[in-house]
Amino acid sequence: MVALAPFFAVGALLAIPALSNLKLVDEAEKYYRIMNDKLYMNIDDIAMFANESRDNVERNLRKLIERRNFPQGHIDASGQCFMLSNEVYKEYLALEDQRRSQQVIEDKNVSEGSIIPEGRQYVLSIKEMHLGIKSEPMSSKLTKLETVLVAIFDRVEKEPDELKKLDKLMRYYLPTTIKLIKTYSDFDNVISPDEEILSTKKEIELTIDSINEACMEFQNRLYKDTAFDADTDAALLKTMLAKEGLIDEMK
């Protein structure tokens, strides 16, 4: 007999219609358990843990979505990822819109060899992996990283003279960060992680904290020259106004 209790406990994400194919219901229960509370997972990974062919898993998932066993279930346009909630699917669609917009920018700048599009592509990669990482505190750390990186690239895009300061960030820090987040995401798929995996995940979380701190300091440095120029301009203006007797220089 199929164990039905887990399905009713998360009715918003998984349901059993009155007349259901019991074999498919078994598959739905198995896939749900494999996802282990995750709302986004590569179909290849589901197939590996289910010990089934990838095509069979995708076919079953599409049937389960059609029959409303997964009421909020979605498969991405490329047939690579399964999403268990409408909210995550909306995030995926927003990410795809950003990716298309970024491609347009890259096409425009390809002749200039601009590294700004490359940097924004790193941000999109982080956001894509973030879709599959909803556990705290890692999710909040990634949101913070995405926000500060977007601010950095926005600033450099407006002030091209700052471009040279991106060298280390682009050549080492971001590629290494992407690699760490990918490892964390892979470990997040392990249903019963051992102490070594848990320890490594914790170390990656602490490293992301350090990366966030470094990126925020990097962002501050991008504004230091502007702040210095503004201070100089302000002091000069006050001196000129005082000489004209328009203000009290002692104030």
Image: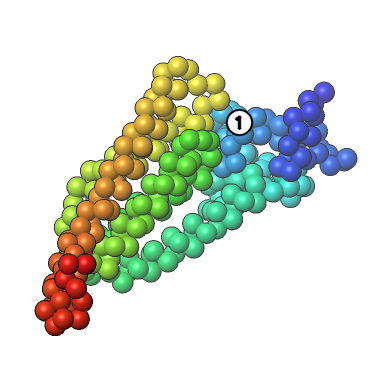
**Which quadrant does the N terminus fall into?**
top right
Tell me what residue is drawn at x 17 percent, y 62 percent. Answer: 228
Q: Position of residue 230 (x, y in %)?
A: 20, 67
- From the viewer's perspective, is residue 179 above or below residue 104? above
The extreme top residue here reads 195
Res. 56 image quadrant: top right
Choose between 31 and 60: the one closer to the eye.
31
Tell me what residue is drawn at x 37 percent, y 27 percent. Answer: 203
Tell me what residue is drawn at x 43 percent, y 43 percent. Answer: 142
Residue 56 visible, this angle: yes
Residue denoted by label 1: 36
Q: Position of residue 119 (x, y in %)?
A: 30, 55
Left or right, 4 with respect to 140, comes to: right
The extreme right residue here reads 18
At label 1, counting other C-alpha atoms closer than 10 Å, the crowd grade (few under 14, some 14-19, many 20 or more) is few
- From the viewer's perspective, is residue 205 above or below residue 221? above
SS at badge 1: loop
Left or right, 3 with respect to 61, comes to: right
**Which quadrant does the C terminus fall into?**
bottom left
Left or right, 222 with respect to 93, comes to: left
Choose between 82 and 149: the one closer to the eye.
149
Q: Amino acid at mark 1?
A: Asn
Q: Position of residue 242 (x, y in %)?
A: 15, 76
Please state the total of marks drawn on the protein image.
Answer: 1
Q: Position of residue 172 (x, y in %)?
A: 23, 43
Tell me what residue is drawn at x 43 percent, y 60 percent. Answer: 99
- From the viewer's perspective, is residue 106 above or below residue 220? below
What's the image's color scheme? rainbow
Residue 162 visible, this angle: no
